[in-house]
Image: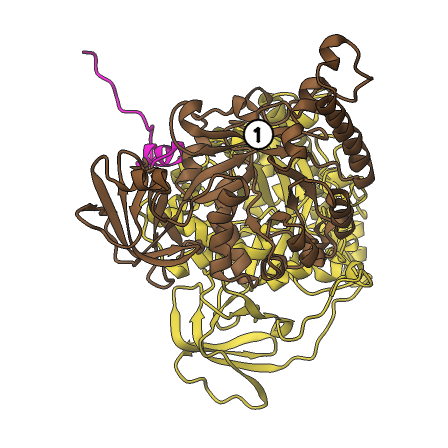
Amino acid sequence: MLRFTVLGALLTSVAVADEPEIPWALAEVEADGLRAIETPVHWPTQSLVISGGTVLTAAGDVFTPGYVVVRGGHITAVGEGEAPEVEDAEQIDATGRYITPGLIDTHSHLGVYPSPWARAHSDGNEATSPTTPGVWAEHSFWPQDPGLQRAAEGGITSLQALPGSANLVGGRGVVLHMTPARGGRAMRFPGAPETLKMACGENPKRVYENSGPSTRMGNVRGQRRVFLDAAEGMEEWQEYSESLAAFREFEELSDKDKAKARRRGEAPEEPDMPGRDLDQETLIGLLHGDIYAQIHCYRADDMLSMMQMSDEFGFKIRSFHHAIEAYKIRDLLVEHDISASTWADWWGFKLEAYDAVQANAAMLHDAGGRAIIHSDSEIGIQRLNQEAAKAMRAGIAAGIELSTDDVLRWVTANPAWAIGIDDQVGTLEVGKRADLVIWDAHPLSVYAHADNVFVDGHLIIDREQPQTWSDFEIGQGVH
Amino acid sequence: MLVLLAALAAAGPCFFVSGDIRTADGPVDSVSFDSETGLILSSSQAGDCTAIVPPTSEQARVITAGFVAVGTRTGLTEVGAVSATNQTDAGGDNPFRASLVVTESYNPMASHIAVTRMAGVTDAVVVPSGGLISGQGGWVRLTGDTQSDAVVDASVVMAGGRDGHMSRTLRVWRQLFDDADYLKKNRGVVDRGTARPLSAHPEDLRALWPVMSGELPLMVGVDRASDIESLLTFIAGTELSVVIDGGAEAWRHADALAAADVAVLLDPTVFGPGGFDQLQGRPDNAKLLADAGVRIMLGHTGTHNARLVAHQAGIAVGQGLSAQQALTAVTTTPREVFGIGGGALTAGTPATFVIWESVTSEIATDPFEPTTRAVAVYIDGVAQDMSSRQTDLGERYRGLPGSPLVPLTPQ
């Protein structure tokens, strides 16, 4: 039987990688909670050849004119000039237009704070305790939020729906693919990791002023406490996983070998599963590396405290959200490979948003970091390309060289990385899912409209064929 | 006429700017102005004036009048959530604050003013919030270190508040206006102690007199078409001059609004299902209103992002408004609605203008494009400093890693 100290347990999660794979028992348990009743919509797959336009790959290449070929929902060819012949393909002439990857928002409250705003719809903050890692945004997510269609019309093909920032540990986010469905689980991005929303700074200490935490130091104590508990819990699941693996191995033996093992006293008992604890399971998932941390944090020093904590407990921060002062610590963000999801120009509404610099994203980019423009808004998400354009303007004004491809990555490839879907989307490259947008003008122009938006090669938005997604908008007399 | 002629004679050194100058009245070739009076001498020829040379760039330049941000809290707060810095809402029990003059709270040193100005916004109509009559809003130019430098007119609008309950608001307003009218017709009753019971302090009632005479526009926060209809009925037959703040569903009454000469300050990013009072909202609201002859203004982006006027104009154009209509909405219309005048870069008006340049050769210079920036801002003929707390912070952190501070040595 293995005995770990708390730190030992953390190291094990890393060391296990070199040993024979032991199935992680918690993942099997989780699968039951993640299973959907509703099934994703399956459209017929159709081959597409989009040609004649400017192809902006967000992978360093710009093809003018260029082409994109889609088969089976994936990109099978992309390049410059004449498109290859493809049998039975729909031909789309994009002459004079621009093709980009679908836009991705790392920070949305669509569905959890849906439109129209109403208290009855405010399902984003479980503000009953400062730490609620066991709540999942997908259980608040209202798939009829009319904002989803508006976002798709703006070229959004994936998003992360997050709980709010009232809590130190606010609960799980959910990475969604823009495929309208009757339930949120059917919109889950296939293969995307689970994510966890955490928050530092003003919001938690304001919300819990009377019961605590009421200070920044109280915030960090609150987070470290639950991680200490979770580290112990992870040890139990680690032991259980090993015992279970040994038991299953035994179960696979022939009756003869089983008997032999029994005689030697080496027959393992079926181990008892650790007690279920939804809050702990999420944190254990984070410590085990299965769940990506997404931390709401404005000030540089707050972000540094979070980075210290992530080192202490051995989890990885994938993105700081809002990250108003990312520019002050951009060297450290680069060193620790943490992205910053920020706005182009929101600032000053509270003290921790006071030191905003419009070139924030550009300065991080310039230092070699992963800059992301997020929306955090049902309005901003409708024009994420324009938000990126404003951040570009500020960067160039500050003397930083930026190309359209660089800036496009702030709303495509980099957000895809932050939410763990960069192997599937975020650029126009062969093998990626065919999530793409055809714009009627340069995508950084305020006048650009998304003529067509594709998800997995399916046309979800066509300006020529408008349709209403949300039941809410039916029968409202809007013409 | 005499005033105008006096303005045309150059009192000090004169300058001119030429190029792609776009105004609400159409393009002009060149604008020359007197740097001492701050007034435009001519909008057609440069004369002997010195050329303004903005920072060089490979991109074409466009020149427009300075944009106006309407209905903002500019200068009224430093940090929104820090209540000690926030003077936007007088608060308290009294919902009738007609005698409140919000520019008395205006801080010309607020750090967001330079940030706003650098985005090509040269003027703002700042208004208070809260209550059923919030108080008087003023016209400020975004320059100067003192209120007397900045405040052009302390009273250009009466902010009517945004209650979200139309019948309640109108009932209260009827009582208020009736009491104000009573005081006007029975002067001295308050001093004599013979006044009937009044719904508000006499000072607040007297402050409504210019509103009732139509001298001071009343700004009303309203979005829903049926509420707008009630408002139109309420003002019919009165002298009231109304500016709608919001108007998400205003397009439904476009003709009636034009006939009643009600101006609309609208936010082109508002979308129908965003709220129950705007379900009939349409992206082309601005276009439908402007086409019907309604005077529209664009913006409504609070305090720190009052700078987004240009972007809002671009969004409206992307949704059908013509570029010329949008330029009018952010330059001359506010100056006209609030009685300041100017904004078309004509002779005798303030030399308040912006020089714009694109940051990329891929997208043409256009003040409404997010890729175009203001490279120079002139207010009343004076070139403005193009730095802010934000650019200063950026400069301070230009070099990393390490501290932004310089190592000191004893002297």
Look at the picture and state if B116 lies above or below B149.
below
The answer to whether residue B320 is left or right of residue B118 is right
Which residue appears farthest toward the top when viewing the image? B192
> What amino acid type is highlighted by mark number 1?
Gly
Camera sees residue A299 = yes
Q: Quadrant of residue B120?
A: top left
Percent position of residue B73, x then y: 55, 33
Q: Which residue is mark 1?
A: B80
The chain drawn yellow is chain what?
Answer: A
- Drawn side of residue B220 relative to residue A10, left or right: right
Is residue A246 at least partly visible in the picture? no
Give the chain letter at badge 1. Answer: B
Stretch of the chain drawn in magenta? B387-411
Which residue corresponds to the image point at 33% horizontal and 28% vertical from the top-left? B404
| Left or right: where B377 falls relative to A434 | left
Quick one: label 1, few (<14), some, or many (20+) residues within 10 Å?
Answer: many
Image quadrant assignment for residue B291: bottom right
Q: What residue is rendered at 71% in x and 18% in y?
A: B187
Specify the colour of chain B.
Answer: brown
Q: If the image is split into quadrants, where does the C terminus of chain B sit?
A: top left
Locate the N terminus of chain B and report the quarter of the image it occupies.
top left
